[in-house]
Amino acid sequence: MAPLSVVTVVLAGGAGSRLSALTRERAKPAVPYGAGYKLIDFVLSNAANSGLRDVWVVQQFHPVSLGAHLRSGRPWDLDRLDGGLLVLHPSQGTDRDGFHTGTADALWKQVESLREAAPQVTVVLSADAVYRLDYDEVIRDHLASFAEVTMVTTRVAPEDAGRYGVVRVAEDGSVVDYRYKPDEPESDLICAEIFVFNTAALIRHLEAAADDVASAGGPGDLGDIGDNILPAMVGAGHAREWRHEGYWRDVGTIASFWAGHMDLLGDDPVHRLDVDGWPLRTASSYTGPARTGSAAVVSGSLVGRGAVIHGEIRHSVVGPGAVIEQGALVRDSVILPGAVVRSGARVETAVVDSGVVVPAEASIGEPRAGATETTARVALLGRDEESSGERPSGFTLAAGEIHPGDDEDPRV
């Protein structure tokens, strides 16, 4: 079990604009995933399975969508009198009020709460990635070291490294260089947005960064921890890595979201959602088993609770409560909860959002057998609040296109 003097902070306030239509009406951590879960379930389940019992979730965008899922925290054993789940919202009335504009800014606004709780260690997590990790192992390794921060690192495709903080480490595990989202990354070893901080050191660096911003004059904020906090700790020689060799995937883009679902499929999937001894926990209103009709064909797929299948599903993930009518084809695609695919429609290499109706004889996406995250042209059919009723029969959405388009996103 993890030491008692630990607070886990889940940074769940990002807008998630790279997920386009999937985050127009919900927080990114509330996006459905894997035929019955939500993205935040991965970090909360890791925390629960690691014995962490004091979890703070920092919200901001579309808080109701996430709050409705979190509720009391019971699925993750966080409905307790001592510690448990604490949901933090933007507030007013202090010198740290208002919306945060980055991860460092979000943590700085919680400094007084951290001082009051006085944990020895603060674990900071994002809710954007799919992985399985025992945080207790990282915490114990951190406490046995000299470091102010332990960064969990992993390797990614070299062409993707520039999306993250890129690190260089010495043979003893010390982080000797950190570059945040570099234009030309020198390595494929990146920080997985999983951190264990000495709380006193974290507070000291946050306050120093705030003083630097204030001394510069004019409006400003602390930005992300990759802009200031981590470079300062690395530069002082107080950072080390903990290498994660298992599965880890950031699913913050449409292509990676689709590819992450494809990783769940096949006779020997790249990643399994639930394994013995490490349950993936969630809160769900869907009950009852999925049901297939006499004409249904289901091959190499995951199907969520309460789904009704009369059509053909091949190598796809179908969420709870979804309906696939007879004569419809879903292939290499992700159908989110409650969506309906009408008779005669074809959905291929695509993502269909929750509650969306794919009209009869529609064509969404195109066949892309063997496609990967970098080669797939994933179509995204989102909710269309401007239309009355369903989209017209025979509606077509070409490969790689998004409907409604990004220009209709009010955050852009």
Image (cartoon, rainbow, N blue to C red):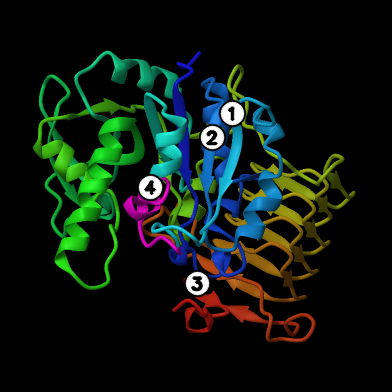
- Compare marks 2 and 3 and give the one earlier in the sequence: 2
Q: In the picture provided, is 143 more to the left or to the right than 305?
A: left
Going by the numbered disc 1, the residue's amino acid type is Gly
Residue identified by numbered label 3: 399
Q: Nearer the viewer, residue 404 or 78?
A: 78
Going by the numbered disc 3, the residue's amino acid type is Ala
**Can you see residue 267?**
no
Quarter occupied by the C terminus? bottom left
Image height check: is 156 above or below 4?
Answer: below
- Closer to the camera: disc 3 or disc 1? 1
Q: Quadrant of residue 364?
A: bottom right
Number of the label disc, if any, that sits on residue 125: none
Image height check: is 99 above or below 251?
Answer: below
Residue identified by numbered label 2: 55
Q: Residue furthest right?
A: 294
Q: CA distance from mark 2 to mark 3?
A: 41 Å
Q: Cβ–Cβ below 8 Å for labels 4 and 2?
A: no
Q: CA distance from mark 4 to mark 2?
A: 14 Å
- Compare marks 4 and 2 and give the one earlier in the sequence: 2
Q: Residue at x 19, y 19 (%)?
A: 146
* Residue 404 pos. (x, y %): 58, 79
Q: Nearer the viewer, residue 338 or 86?
A: 86
Residue identified by numbered label 1: 83
Q: CA distance from mark 4 to mark 3?
A: 40 Å
What crowding class fits label 1: few (fewer than 14 Cα within 10 Å), some (14-19), or many (20 or more)?
A: some
Going by the numbered disc 4, the residue's amino acid type is Leu
Q: Cβ–Cβ below 8 Å for labels 4 and 1?
A: no
Image height check: is 311 above or below 391?
Answer: above
Q: Which residues are magenta?
A: 98-110
- Compare marks 3 and 1 and give the one earlier in the sequence: 1
Q: Cβ–Cβ below 8 Å for labels 1 and 2?
A: yes
Q: In the picture provided, is 75 more to the left or to the right than 350?
A: right
